[in-house]
Image (tube, rainbow, N blue to C red):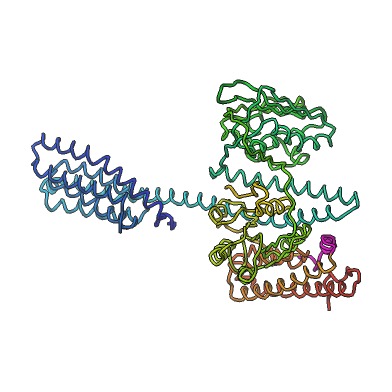
Amino acid sequence: MTLLAQLPSKLDLGASVKAQAILRALLALPIVLGGAGLFHLSGIASTWIWLLGACQLIYTLLMLILAHHPGRFTARQLVSLSAVLDPLVLSAWLPLMNEYGGLVVGFYLFTILGFGFRTGLKLMRVCQLVSIAGFSAVLLVVPFWREHFVIWLSFLVTLIVVPLYATVLIRKLHESRAHAEQESMAKSELLARVSHELRTPLSGIMAATQLLAMETSDKKAAKRAETILGLSKDLLHEINDLLDQSKYEAKALVLESVALNLPEQMERVRLTMEPAAAKKNLAFRTSMDPRIADWVLGDSHYLSRVLLNLVGNGVKFTDHGEILIGMHLLDESETEYRIRFTVQDSGIGIAPEHHERIFEPFFQTDSGTVRRYGGTGLGMTIAREIVKLMGGDLRLASELGKGTLFYFDLSMPRTGIPEERISSSEVVPLVNGKRIFVVDDHETNLMLIKELLEQDRHEVTVATGGMESLEILSSREFDVIFLDFNLSDMDGLRLLQLYRFGTVNPAPTFFLTADATLVTADKLKNSGAVGVLIKPIILGELRRAVAQACGLTSAKTTVIDQASSKSARPILKAVPAQAIDLTVIEHLKSISGRPAFLRELLTHAEEDIRRNCEDLVRALTIRDIECIADTAHALKGVCASIGAVRLMAVATGLMRCSREDLKRAEPRMRTDVTEASIATLDAIGNILADIDSKKPVDSSAAFLHTN
């Protein structure tokens, strides 16, 4: 039996108590009145019948009041009390009913099974035992049942057997529910891991690439940096698709209703997608109905998301011809427009049998399409779901080899032009010389963000932990604070609360996080922060945040709006012989023109690796599985930052370590950590020595040395 079946949550119990009280009230009055009338006509003593009926109505009313206004009673106490009192109240009718007492058995079963389905098996058994005791007592006080013992016994067997059989069904029901909830939790954890594990390194990639693009005068290098940024944005787009799908399934994708200018919306889509079409020598045309003159109310972000997705697919699946976007007025009144949005291409087309399936999650027509064009198969699903939330339906017309037309119709309220027009393409004021505090326990991201901010001549102070940050904040004042939400010693939310509590004029604070899930969104909703920057962090977002903190722009920063089994794995596996990947070192050298930058970064990494490895060996020794996973995760992040591939492979394996793995191979795991850490620290020491001697980094320094 699952724990869920035995003990529902407090919220479930409260809802169960209210539902039972309402059902009891709805059934009590007609049953009491109807039964009393029936017994009166049958000649049964009506005075006692009416008195007992009045008592039952009082009990029903009292339980209804307590269910909605429990006072000192908890939901658990109320539901346990009703599991005893409900069958006792039914049993009180038996001495007065003679042969009609058989009707009570049906209500016994109704009550018993109700407790089973609503509250779990434990209270169902309590209710069943009280019902059996009450029905057994009637044998002693009612001559009719002693005279018809076989009938009484058949009813008693029913009270015993039916709930026992129902127990099996209820157990399966609760186990299925628990399994479904576990799968949902596993999916949420997976999305959180995808968000964190992919966004965090992607943040470093994009930040470093922007620095390269800003610092280089080589056109070829700038072109390569542009290519890296483009690919990084594509990857970020796929991550966002996964998270948007999760939000929609959780009914957490909420649309805004703000004033937007559709011609400007069309122009933004054109400016975004026309270069991609030009690279494939595709004509790109737009068609805007001139009768759409007024602004409308809608969600600019998600409308653009749908159009960009449709146009992006059109460009992807078209090798020659054109892409045409249209907004056409179907109907209008004084208060709203009825507009048809169209995206047409001359690409490969879609077979008729796939017209509906194309909107299914992860569906792609064939493996050849996947290999050639890529993608997750989520874009069209999310686009249709967003259009449905807007009140329309995304449809298509297509034939193989003749292109595809996607279209949807929306009713959009007309509105006047807002007094303050702030478009997404607004130039952010460039602010210089501010005192900025950055807190992040991921060393590479911390230093890269610092380098980006120093490009605008800000005075940047950094910290890697919560306690260190509190000490700095207690002694210095800052203009802006960027605070990582996930810190090793203290979560960012608590740090912000302590800072705001102890400061008269706290600086505007922005959270940094790679976790774009709903759990984190709920935590940050009323945190007191000005905004939230979602990793990967780019220079434009940092500049916008600083400008917003200084009151120079009202543009909002990016804000979050919204235990599975492990398969057996071999403990012994191949790991890279190379301790440090020198291509990563060369990349890090190119990020900053400061000679000390690489040395500072490697020194911090050396300290983090030594500390984390010591903690990891200690956790392995005492077999603390939670501490192992957390420490290995931190170690992996540090190793990934500097290209410590061997130690990163060991840390990655330990992150997925199960209790069974730990029992089997704990000594070997400690040996792996120790050997890999020694090799990595030696390699870092050799690289630092080369830096100090101003020699080129020796490639042999990155490999293991054997005795």
Q: Residue 375's spot in the image, x, y percent?
A: 72, 42
Quarter of the image for the C terminus: give it: bottom right
- Asked whether, in this view, residue 17 is left or right of residue 410, the answer is left
- Asked whether, in this view, residue 301 is left or right of residue 183, the answer is right
Establish if 362 lies above or below 401.
Answer: below
Observer able to see residue 368:
yes
Q: Give the range drawn in magenta.
A: 575-593
Q: Specify whether residue 113 is painted magenta.
A: no
Residue drawn at x 62%, y 73% is 620
Q: State which quadrant residue 294 falls in.
A: top right
Q: Residue 162's spot in the image, x, y percent?
A: 31, 47
Compare residues 336 and 44 and report the one nearer the observer.
Answer: 336
Compare residues 504 and 328 and report the one nearer the observer.
Answer: 504
Q: Residue 269's spot in the image, x, y percent?
A: 73, 35
Looking at the rendered structure, the number of numbered marks drawn on it comes to 0
Q: Specify whether residue 579 is painted magenta.
A: yes
Compare residues 29 and 503 and report the one nearer the observer.
Answer: 503
Residue drawn at x 87%, y 54% is 216
- Asked whether, in this view, residue 163 is left or right of residue 527, the answer is left
Establish if 285 lies above or below 151.
Answer: above
Establish if 275 lies above or below 207.
Answer: above
Observer able to see residue 194:
no
Compare residues 308 and 171 and report the one nearer the observer.
Answer: 308
Q: State which quadrant residue 629 falls in.
A: bottom right
Residue drawn at x 75%, y 34% is 270
- Asked whether, in this view, residue 424 is left or right of residue 562, the answer is right
Quarter of the image for the N terminus: give it: bottom left
Q: Residue 430's spot in the image, x, y percent?
A: 75, 51
